[in-house]
Image: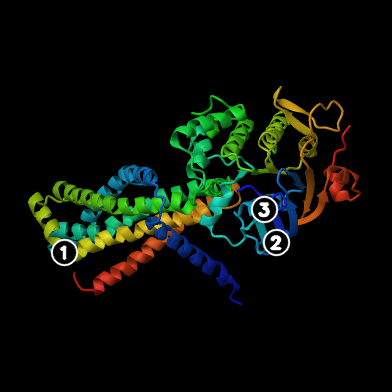
Amino acid sequence: MFDFLKEPFIAVQEFFLLTGRALRNVASRPHYGDEILSQMDLIGVGSLPIVILTGLFAGAVMALQMSRALQQYGQQDQTGTLVSISLVRELGPVLTALMMAGRNSSGIASELGSMKVTEQIDAMRALGTDPIQKLVTPRMLATALMLPLLTILADFIGMFGGWFVSHFFLDLPSQQYWSNVWRALEWNDITQGLLKPFVFAFIISLVGCYYGLRASGGTQGVGRATTQSMVAASVLILILDFFLGKIFVSQGGS
Amino acid sequence: MPADPQTPVLRFDRVSVSFDDTPALADVSFQAYEGESRVIMGATGSGKTVLLKTALGLQRPDSGTVYVFGRDISRMRERELFEIRSRMGMLFQESALFDSLNIEDNVSYPLLNQASIHCPPEEVLPRVEEALKFVELEGTLEKFPSELSGGMRRRAAIARAVVTQPPLLLYDSPTAGLDPITANTIVALIVKERDLNKTTTLIVTYRYQDGNLVANFRYNPENGGLEPAAGHAGSQGGAAPRTVFMVLRDGRLVFEGPQTEIEASQDPYISKFVKHRE
């Protein structure tokens, strides 16, 4: 009767098993340091342009739209406050994570998927390497290290984008903007803004690895794995974002 | 740990494997002894590849037991399997060379990563070069798999499988998708490896010629070519090792025996694979 539930349940179980094994491997040998570094370069440095552009325009658009709302209350000079809070708490982490899901979850899924369907994963096991240790753990660690850093960068670039709009389009004094940006932030915002990308990093990397490693059926299967990983990672990020936000808001703070 | 000649190198005991309720191997039992060659034939989807993967422990049997070098691997943990696998070589169907590594790194991979191969760093390159010389691919060290032709990739993959000189070698469709001349070169390499290093060899193939070469020819170290084994016209050397033919059908082992028996078989499925020698 509940047969239709079997598949999703197995999928969730397999995902958690993969997560468990990837985490356990962090502490066990052998460590593939080179692999972590090259993935940090690929995932982190490679995402710089896309993160900078996203951050810049997200901040600019926030300033533009919020100033319109604030104008109604005659509070247009508070633009910096709104840009700052919404960027650090929400837009920075979520937009960066969504961009990374599009770029890296799918990238990881297609790379690992191609290796799976051409038997390279089997060959790896046959030649004495644990594919989770060699492929999954380094990608997970690299993303977990890089995504918070990229988010911080996106936040700052976004604030700069907000300043650009406030200064050149809204004629707000620069000093007022920056002091509002600074004063608006509380520790709660910063913690939330850094914890979120850290959690999202696990979603991005592990969802990509999960779909890649279970790809089957030739090139078509790789294509399917790529799309599924991106969709699943994006949706999970938005869902988790809500719950993380809920926890922080109910814990008090602004 | 030299195997006792009485202990089979590879033993399947009533092994069944299935994927989503579709049986891939059903109740398969056989024993392969040291130095023996086994030619495994069967239609596409008859379970040939699954059999090799089960022998390597890449696929776990649903029931039954697989013994490799006398040890039960069916319920072994992955880490324990690494030790057993380091004494086995496998050629995958589509070569399965690592795209991201060049040929040198591909061939040295088992030397550097296999659990029980303790290869001193200064010996890695010479052994890689030796393995590539064996498959006549010297000078491709820096090339990437995508830069090689299908036949060359297959040869590089053989080099990777034999570089650790494992006593048990598994070849999954070594000649699939190759032209007849290249295909014969590949089988000649397999026979050469078997006769020089006295390996136990399992070959999955759908070409009867491959089985015939394995069963009736041997490697001549003097001229570097194949020659008919003892008992055949034009033979000068010794006999070829014992060769057993196996035929799989829908996961079941429907035939196991020497070449004379497979050629005499009246079964329409089995005789389809046999092309009689001139």
Measured as percent of width and height from the top left, residue B165 is found at 60, 39
Res A102 visible: no
Determine if marks 3 and 2 fall on one subunit: yes
Given residues B188 and B10, the one toward you in this image is B10
Q: Which residue is mark 1?
A: A186
Locate residue A232 relative to residue B88 in the image: left or right. Answer: left
Q: Amino acid at mark 2?
A: Ser
Amino acid tagged 3: Val
- To the question of a shared chain for discs 1 and 2, the answer is no
- The answer to the question of whether label 1 and label 2 lie on touching residues, with beta carbons closer than 8 A, is no
Distance from disc 3 to disc 2, alpha carbons, whole Å, reads: 10 Å
Q: Are marks 1 and 3 on the same chain?
A: no
Q: Name the residue nearer the viewer: B22 or B199.
A: B199
Q: Which mark is residue B50?
A: 3
Between the residue at mark 1 and the residue at mark 3, the CA separation in whole angstroms equals 59 Å
Q: Residues within 10 Å of mark 2 (few under 14, many from 20)?
A: many
Amino acid type of the residue that numbered disc 1 sits on in the rendered structure: Glu
Q: Position of residue A56 (x, y in %)?
A: 25, 48
Q: Quadrant of the C terminus of chain B?
A: top right
Circle 3 SS class: helix
